[in-house]
Image: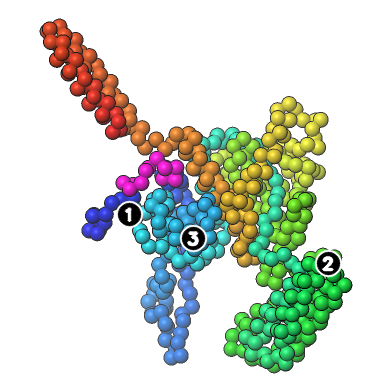
Amino acid sequence: MSTADFFRARLDQMIDLRHPLAALAQRMPWQQIEAALLPSFARKEGLPRLNDKGEDLFGPSVQVAGSGISAAGRPRLPIRLMAALLYLKHAFNLSDEALVERWSENVVWQYFSGLNYYEPRLPCDATQIGRFRAAIGEAGVEELLKATLDAAVQNKAIRPSEFERVIVDTTVQEKAIAHPVDSRLLEIARHKVVQAAQRVGIHLKQTFAKEGKTLRRKAGGYAHAKQFKRLRKTVKRQRTILGIVLREIGRKLPGIQPQNPNSIAALSALLERAERIRNQQPRDKNKLYALHAPEVECIGKGKARKPYEFGVKASIAVTHRNGLMVGARTFPGNPYDGHILSAQLEQSRILLEDIGRQPKEVVVDLGFRGVDEDNPNVQIIHRGKFKSLSAPQRRWLKRRQAVEPAIGHLKSDHRMDRCWLRGQQGDALHAVLCATGYNLRWLMRAMVRLGLKALLLRPQFGAFWTLYMRLSSASAMLSTFLRGRCYPKMAFGAADILLNFAGLTMYRA
C-alpha cells in the first residue's frame, strides 16, 4: 500500500456489499477469465520504425538489445478491468462513451472491475474498448459467456442437470444501416466514389453534385406522392450519372501514382460496390443493401409489422427452466433454421465443458423439422411430433415460447436491436456479448433471489447469535439468583441490561 492510499477510503467501505453487483464481483471466476484472455495480449516482436536517417524511432532494436521483444508501446490495461467494461456495457445497454463516463461516477462498478480505491477519472479511452474486443476475438467473448455459466453453477443459482434441456430459436440481428432505397443508394455511391477519387488525385470533369442532390429530393417527393412513373425516370437518371462518373474514374485510374497504396485499394473496392448498386434490379438476388456493409442480407421472418429485416440471422439457446443463455451465434447467408442447429449445439457443448453436461433434449419450433439425422445424440422436440411425444415431453413443449421474451430483452435491453460493429466478425462478437450482458443481469437477480447478498455476514451472524443465547442464559440465571436473595428490582434491572447488550450486539451484526 502506498502512502497516498493509506489516507483514502477503500471501496468495500464506501459501498453496500449486499448490492447484487458487489456480491457478484466476488463470485465471478476472474482468474479463469484472465488466464483465457492473456494469450491474446502476448507481446510480439515487431519491425522497427525507421526515420529518414535510418534510426529506430523506438530506441534500440531487438537485435541490439537482445531481449527478444521490443519495449515500445504503452503498457496494457488490466484484463479484468476491460472484461468488466464489456460486461457492464451490454448488461446496462450503454455506448462506449457513455460507459466510461458512468464508470467514473459509479463506485459499485469500480468495485466490480477490481479496483480497491475510488478513481474519479475515466478508466480508458472509449476507443480502447473496441480494440480490446477486436483483440480477443470471438473465442475471447465466448470465454466471457462461459464464465457467467460457471459462476451460475458455482453459486448454485442453477443446477447442472438443467443444461441438458435447452430451447433454440432464431432471430435477425439488424445492422445499423438506413432502409435501402434505390435512389438513396445511388446518390450515396456517387458521392463516396467522387470523394475517394479526389483523395487519390483524380480530377473529374463533372461530379454531378448539384444535380445528384436535386434528383434525390425529387425521388423522395415522387415516392411519397406515389408518382411511380416520374420516380422511375428519376432513378434512371441517377444510374446514368453514376455510370458516367465510374467510367471516367476507370479511364484515369491506371495513370495515377498515389503516395498511399492503400487509397488505391480502397477506391477499387468502392468502385466494385458502386457498380453492383448501379446494375442491380429490384427483384435480383444477392443485392447490395449498404455501401459500407456489404454483408447485410434481407431476411423475412413473417412479421406483419416488419416484413423484411436487414442484418444477419442469429441463433439463441437458453435453458428450458430458468432461461439462462447457453449459446448465441450468427449465421451469414440466411440458411435454413434446421441446418444451423448442429452448429449451435456444438457451441453450447464447448461452453459447458467445465460443467460436465451437454444438451440432450432440444425444444424448437417447426422451422427445425427434418434434421434428426444430423443430430443423432440429441432428442429434438417440436409440435410436428406431438402425437408421438410422451406426457413429460408435451409439458416441455409448452415452454418453447419462453425463448421469445428472452430474445426481446436481448434486443431492447442488451443492444441486439442494432449492430454497429463492422463486418461479419463484428456481427459474431456482438451476438455473444449481448448474451453475456443478459446472463450478467440474470446472475444479479439470482443474487437477490437466493439471498446470496447476506453470505458475507453469515459467519459473524452465527458468532453473535451464540453470544446472544449465552447472554440470555446468563441473564436468566442472574435474575433467579437475585430473586432468591430478595432483590427483585435488582434482578429485573440486571436482566434488562444483559438483554439490551445482546440485542444491541445483534443489531450491529
* Residue at left offset 45%, top offset 66%: 125
Residue 82 in view here: no
Q: For marks 2 and 3, give the CA distance.
A: 42 Å
The residue where tag 1 is placed is 117
The residue where tag 2 is placed is 226
Q: Secondary structure at mark 2?
A: loop
Please identify, in this view, whether the residue under mark 2 or under mark 3 is nearer the observer: 2
* Residue at left offset 73%, top offset 57%: 309
Question: Callout 3 environment at 10 Å: few (<14), some (14 to 19), or many (20+)?
Answer: few
Left or right: 418, with 129 as reference point: right
Question: Residue 224 placed where, x, y %?
Answer: 78, 67
**Image quadrant containing the C terminus:** top left
Question: Callout 1 environment at 10 Å: few (<14), some (14 to 19), or many (20+)?
Answer: some
The residue where tag 3 is placed is 98
Marks 2 and 1: CB-CB under 8 Å? no
Q: For marks 2 and 1, give the CA distance.
A: 63 Å
Q: Earlier in the sequence, mark 1 or mark 3?
A: 3
Name the residue nearer the viewer: 281 or 131: 281
Left or right: 74, with 470 as reference point: right
The three-letter code of the residue at mark 2 reads Lys
**Image quadrant containing the N terminus:** bottom left
Question: Callout 2 environment at 10 Å: few (<14), some (14 to 19), or many (20+)?
Answer: few
In this rendering, the count of numbered labels is: 3
Kindly indicate the quadrant of the structure image that contains residue 258. bottom right
The image's colouring method is rainbow
Indicate yes or no whether the magenta region holds residue 13.
yes
The three-letter code of the residue at mark 1 reads Tyr
Give the magenta part as a residue range. Answer: 12-23
Q: Secondary structure at mark 1?
A: loop
Q: For marks 1 and 3, give the CA distance.
A: 22 Å
